[in-house]
Amino acid sequence: MKKNLQRLDLIFKNEHDSEAILKKTFGRTDDDVINDLISSGLKGRGGAGFPTGLKWKLAAETQSDEKFVICNADEGEPGTFKDREILSSVPHKVLSGMAVCAKIIGAKKGYIYLRSEYNFLKPQLLRVIDEFHDLFDSLNLDFRVEIFMGSGAYICGEESALFESMEGKRGEPRNKPPFPTDSGYKNKPTVINNVETLAHTYSILKYGADKFKDLGIQDSRGSKVFSVSGDTPAPGIYELEFGMSLQKFVDDFGDGDSKAVQVGGASGFCVPRKRFNKTVIGYQGKLRGTSLPTGGSMMIFNSSRSMYNVLHNYLDFFVEESCGQCTPCRVGTQQLLLGIQAVKKGEQPSSYLNKLLDLAEAMRVTAKCGLGQSVANSFSSIVENFKEEMIY
Amino acid sequence: MSDKINLKIDNIAVSIKSGATILEAAKKVNIRIPTLCYHEDLCVAGNCRVCVVEQVGSDRLLPACAMPVNEGMEINTNSMKVRNARKQIVELLVSEHRADCTRCYKNGKCELQELSSEYIVGENGFIDLVAHKGYTIDNFSPSIIKDDSKCIRCQRCVRTCDQLQSISALTVAHKGEHMKVSSFFDKPMFEVVCTNCGQCVNRCPTGALTEKTYLDEVWSALNSDTKHTVVQTAPAVRIALGEALGMPPGEIVTGKMVSALRRLGFNSVLDTDFTADLTIIEEGNELLQRLKKVVKEKDDSVKLPLTTSCSPGWVKFIEHAFPELLPNVSTAKSPQQMFGALVKTFYAKKIEVKPENIVSVSIMPCTAKKYEADRPEMRSSGFKDVDYVLTTRELALMIKQAGIDFASLPDDEYDSIMGESSGAAVIFGATGGVMEAALRTAYEVVTGREVPFDGLNILPVRGMENIRAVSIKIENVLPEWDFLEGVELKTCVAHGLSNAKQVMEAVRDGKADYHFIEIMACPGGCLGGGGQPIPTSPAIRKKRSEAIYNEDELKPIRKSHENPEVIHLYEEFLKEPLGEVSHQLLHTHYTERNRY
């Protein structure tokens, strides 16, 4: 790790004062806590970026005899491995966040939907959950947390598919509306947050909204945990401030020969070298230049890599991991894959790529859920920026 | 006003109740938004995305079928963005569909074909995906052919099988490119819990699910010099056949149908309604006998409630799902199979034709009847009692093939004998009809008086309510039936297997004390059968139902036991209800089946 990138130490900071924080928070009014979260600017760290405070507020306002808090630990985006680390090293922060959410919205039951490949984390997590159950009892909080194991489908990380999966059905996204805060797990109001999001609420409750808001820029506040992989001498997990330019990131993490960075995994965007300077990491908002939202996956490719192979790999993944229910995603992903193969083999003219770009755009605007909608991100950004690699 | 939502669709103002979808709002102002996975009878899936529309100010398009209206919404259903997206979606569907339309049974009746011609899916479509996948066609079932290469994964069939029928013989398996509509371990349809009801066939937009046709076999019998062809027509065919030949729903075409069958060359044109009346005599007597054993003789080996047995989809369902309740099912065969058994025995003798030279064809609103005719028990005559079963749709196709202008045909009469029927038989085609017919007869047998309903119309058992429980108090009985004096006869009617399941669960758990239950596998009864003209919808079924009850009203005879041909049949051949000949020819037994 070199020089000027400032590594932060909020999330992974070794601090164990859950009891004090919960006590302090439970002493405040629910509105007060929600307002704090809203003013902190915290947005969902799974990638979609929905304001967390608002989500809690909506769920709190919905009337229901039963509500749920779910921690989405189905971390399945290729190139993302930060939630695993958060759950291994600071699970108490996640559980504290869940407890506060439960108290505010009135949920008695919480679940951690754990990616099946993270089965090894389960025993340790269960121990922490047990400790927290005792803590909840001592604080008179009627709240219990269970672990629900996923079974390996990427789509089950999509929140409504996750509910379906928990209900014992096929993991298929639902129509929205209704949104989870109205009708989620078992059709009851549900707050579902990413692991990292919940861990951030701990910091906000401990240090205050202002401290969190001081970090980052404009619409993108606070810090973010990144999973850095690919052609880098320093792969790993890094907590960094929002709003850095990609150039700066590559200067620090690249191997000196970076030709592209895939921001946000297979469903994210590919940024070519010529745009490193103009690209900032953060939620799309009123930023100068291009801003890219991300769940934290940063894959760096150097000039030895074929971007055709990279795209092929992503499309293989989507063809396999589409749930298959909606036309644009199920058929569209197959057509994109077969299409680039056909162009590469010369079976289709290079102009066929334009048809595929139109298709990707149609998928973006018509697919039922985020999976199908975001295939266009990687597809179009790779094809448009590396057209010659697709053809020759 | 508060629960009305105001919006604009293509600049036309619409006001509609809160909770309605964009699709419903558009329909209200006569704007057609194309759909594929949407079906009026089913829950909304929002899968196919053909119905996407543009909301002004929104980047992504919205599925009109699934998206509720919002105050002030401005929707464009025909913007460039919508047209482009919709065309691509149709192209995508065509690319995964084996589009050899000219060779397809659904050619001209395929919703995907219609859309692709509307959006001009030309030569410049996407790469053909079908060629990349090894598809097999499941044509092992006697009723239904499942061709995955034509499936567009809209899941209408899956929702039908689950939501309407509670069977889930068809489910979705795998994901991504391998996602498909499948069965338990992908076994062929005839090995799983499929009841052959054909409701999936009625709702499949393409040729992926069709009935198995026996047109060639029937044509060759009609053209054979040595064969005597006998045809029977089920009650619900005559009120729906017209739809498949360009007429509006609800036309009664009995006379034209009989004309057409003669023109096609059938030697004897007879009526299943005749054996519907016969069923009432046999089943009605079975009910009364069971009541006698249970109420009078306290014989607990005899099971009540008695359930009807004329719907072969229902029979197979209970064999799979509630085998422990099989003793409750009437042993009376369905009208089709009673007819088949009589044709090759009684009727053969009458017309002096050897039974082996008779080809017995039935026209049914049903796909399960094809399966029923194939059951090994259905050979009481020593031959296959019913040789070929055609659906209403197949008959319409034969009429077209023969170049007959159906609408201009004169009305004709059924042949005698086995052509006469009562109004009670006609209403077999509607849910509640068998119950009503049975009550008209049983009540009169027991009391000597007509059922106490105006014009014999037992309105409480009619209608489309899912489950209808009706009690009738029996009073002033004839001496022979004194044990029934004052008994409240408790009956129940259910249509669609989801509703049947609910009723039978209550019976199994001892939570229902019915005496007699009518169950029809299909929504609306046979008039909504899996062999009826496509499309089907609540409105269409209502029209068909009205036609059935009109036909009943027009009949000079309204009660099964007054059918002179049936009376004659007992005098000359059967001797008595539930007698020895009846036992041999008109009753059957059932088989416990697997649960998957």
Image (tube, coloured by chain):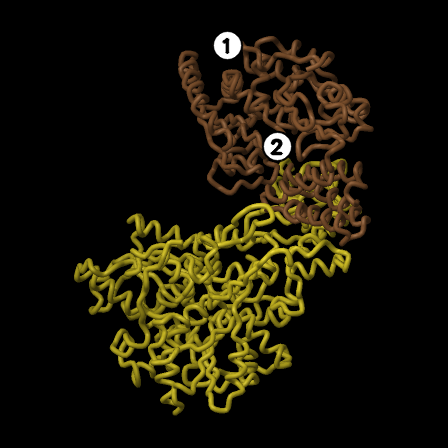
Chain colours: A brown, B yellow
* Residue at the farthest front position: A304
Question: Can residue B501 be seen here?
Answer: yes
Given the image, what chain letter belongs to the residue carrying mark 2? A
- State the residue in front, B121 or B584: B121
Q: Residue at x 82, y 49 (%)?
A: A351
For mark 1, name the chain: A
Residue under circle 1?
Answer: A16
x and y percent of residue B381 in the render? 34, 80
Q: Secondary structure at mark 2?
A: loop
Q: Earlier in the sequence, mark 2 or mark 1?
A: 1
- In the displayed structure, A268 sits above or below A358; it is above
Residue linked to disc 2:
A77
Residue located at (51% from left, 79% from top): B217
Crowding around mark 2 (Cα neighbors within 10 Å: few <14, some 14 to 19, many 20+) is many
Q: CA distance from mark 2 to mark 1?
A: 30 Å
Q: Quadrant of the N terminus of chain B?
A: top right
Residue at 49%, 7% in the rendered image: A20
Residue A123 is left or right of residue A215, and the answer is left
Provide residue B225's location: percent of width, then percent of height: 50, 91
B198 vs B149, left or right, is left
Amino acid type indicated by mark 2: Glu
**Along the line of sight, which residue is nearer the eye, A226 or B426?**
A226
Identify which amino acid the numbered label 1 is placed on: His
> Is label 2 or label 1 in front?
2
Q: Are marks 2 and 1 in contact (CB under 8 Å)?
A: no
